[in-house]
Amino acid sequence: MKSVFLPLALCALTLPLVAPHAARAEGPVTVAPVEVTDWKAVYGRVEARDMIPARARLGGTLVELAVSEGDAVQAGQPLGRIVDEKLVFQLGAIDAQLQALGAQLTNAEAELTRGEELLARGVATAQRLDALRTQVDVVKGQIEAQRAQRQVVEQQTTEGTVLAPISGRVLNVPVAVGAVVMLGEVVATIGGGGFFLRVAVPERHADVMRQGDAISIETATGAAQGTLAKVYPQIENGRVVADVEVPELDAAFVDARVLVRLPMGKRQAILLPASLIETRSGLDFVLVERDGARMERAVVPGARSVENGVDMVEILSGLTGGETVVAHEQ
């Protein structure tokens, strides 16, 4: 009796294990070489398209500073004010000279009036009258020169206001209130004109980089797409510099590093859905169907990618194209 019931018990235990293998995961797939793009991962830096320093147009002491790093500014907005106390004294000296010349002009005009009266009486000569007129003209010319000089000093005073050269964001402020700045010294650096990614890749890849290529970018919020906007012709330190435009690029931190994947060329490869690959004991197998017969074949998988929402795996070895691959029975 024991020899009769034991096989029946084993069959009862085996049936639940065999039943799930009746279903198949998905239909057959005929593999064929397809064109894929090789990508190179590099780091790009977030940079402003235009980085223009706001320079001091007047040497003196910085008495006001209205901005700090990160502030948004508009072109022509005052950023600070520089005062040169010597200009105040120059204006005072010019005003004193104008007062003295005014007195001289009054005296010269009075002398001219008396000379004209004496000439009418026949006491003075015409030569003396011409000398008096010349003296009046000379004093008037000196007054005009001093007024022009005063306008120059007044213009220098107004140039003490440091203006933003472009609209954008303040990236750097290397000075502080109370500092003595020289003519042409940088008070603030403004970044504007939009932000982009600047990358540098080895020069051996220069021939495969084309403007307008689609670029894949890894950001903190996920993957994004960009465009290779410009490839600079000058090679620096064995690297080609290029700019990548990214819509709505996060420019909260300028010079931040962002992972960029650049297309480095195209080649033929065999892609297979990842669900058709089975891994056992560290080896990867696919089930190949040929003439109605099925056989397992060991393959070497490569990089993974997502094509039309399907997780695909590149097959480096084991398939040559034209084979029909079916799913393993589950």
Image (tube, helix red, strand yellow):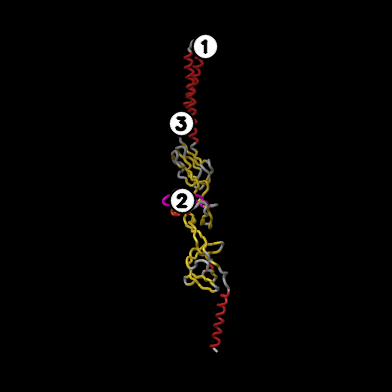
What residue type is disc 3 on? Gln
Residue drawn at 55 percent across, 80 percent down: 14
Residue under circle 2? 241
Q: Position of residue 116 (x, y in %)?
A: 51, 14
| Alpha carbon distance from label 2 to label 1 | 87 Å
Q: Secondary structure at mark 1?
A: helix
Mark 3 — residue?
Answer: 90
**Could you classify mark 2 by the number of other residues whose Cα lies within 10 Å: few (under 14), some (14-19), or many (20 or more)?**
some
Which residue is label 1 attached to? 120
Q: Residue 54 location in percent, x, y?
A: 48, 42
Look at the image and say whether residue 204 sits in the magenta stretch.
no
Judge the density around disc 3: few (<14), some (14-19), many (≥20) Cα neighbours within 10 Å: some
Residue 253 in view here: no
Residue type marked 1: Ala
Magenta segment boundaries in residue numbering: 228-245
Q: In the picture shown, does residue 45 fall above or below 96? A: below
